[in-house]
Image (spheres, rainbow, N blue to C red):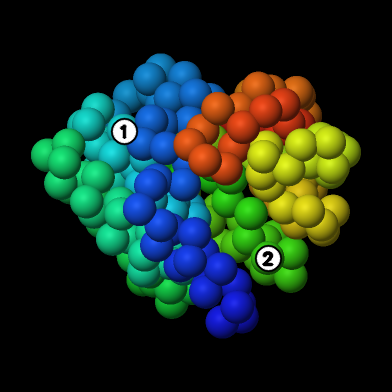
Amino acid sequence: MTDSWIQRWNKRYGEKEYAYGIEPNSFLKQQIDQLEVGTILFAAEGEGRNAVYAAKLGWEVYAFDISEEGKKKAIELANANDVTIDYRVGLLPELDFQLKQFDVIALIYAHFPPEIKSSYHKLLDKYLKKGGVVIFEAFGKKHIEYRKKNDKVGGPSDLESLFSVQELKSDFKDYEIIKLDEEEVELNEGLYHNGKGSVIRFIGRK
């Protein structure tokens, strides 16, 4: 992962306002509201909106990102809501998470660089308990056309950083697929996710 990638996200999260707001992603909220509280890991968690929501429900929350600025904002948000999250900054293989540590892994707009995204998914799989759940929402391949029409909807501008249904099937093979679709959504998340986009939504049980 390049220094320019890290600098990009530190710049975005270094702004005063929360880039994607402070409310949880609606799909994430819908899913974890139905689950029994346990241990959850948020990947590429940025400024902490989803992690803090889970902590308020009583989850034992872990999160990681490459951005120190994102962590600062996440800890501020956690403190404002009187909750605690274990937030680590760095590359996933170096963060000392344990095999079969988590009941749930949440990947909400976790657009890792194309050259590592599948390897990160496969490593995250190792951290999930048998019977555990992956909750995933991120921009799909069709989103490239939505972004051309409205760059305020956000998301990567290169096809390689977007996801496909087949990619998810491959990265999380042998999972029970509870949901796996690419669908159009209307986003209203802070400064950088606004308008219609195309996302992959995946719920899988290991």
Residue 113: assigned label = 2
The residue positioned 29% from the left and 29% from the top of the image is 37
Quadrant housing the N terminus:
bottom right
Q: Secondary structure at mark 2?
A: loop
Can you say whether 65 is above or below 34 in the image?
below
Q: Is residue 58 left or right of residue 96?
A: left
The CA span between labels 1 and 2 is: 26 Å
| Mark 1–mark 2 CB contact (< 8 Å) | no
Name the residue furthest bottom: 3
Residue 69 image-quadrant placement: bottom left
| Residue 179 visible in the displayed image | no
The residue positioned 63% from the left and 60% from the top of the image is 112
Q: Tell me where residue 45 appears, x and y as whole percent.
A: 44, 51
| Residue 51 visible in the displayed image | yes
- Residue type at mark 1: give it: Tyr
Between 22 and 119, the one nearer to me in the picture = 22
Can you say whether 28 is above or below 123 in the image?
above
Q: Tell me where residue 89 appears, x and y as whole percent.
A: 38, 69
Quadrant housing the C terminus:
top right
Can you say whether 95 is above or below 152 in the image?
below
Between 132 and 33, the one nearer to me in the picture = 33
Q: Is residue 149 left or right of residue 173?
A: right
Residue 77 image-quadrant placement: top left
Residue 53: assigned label = 1
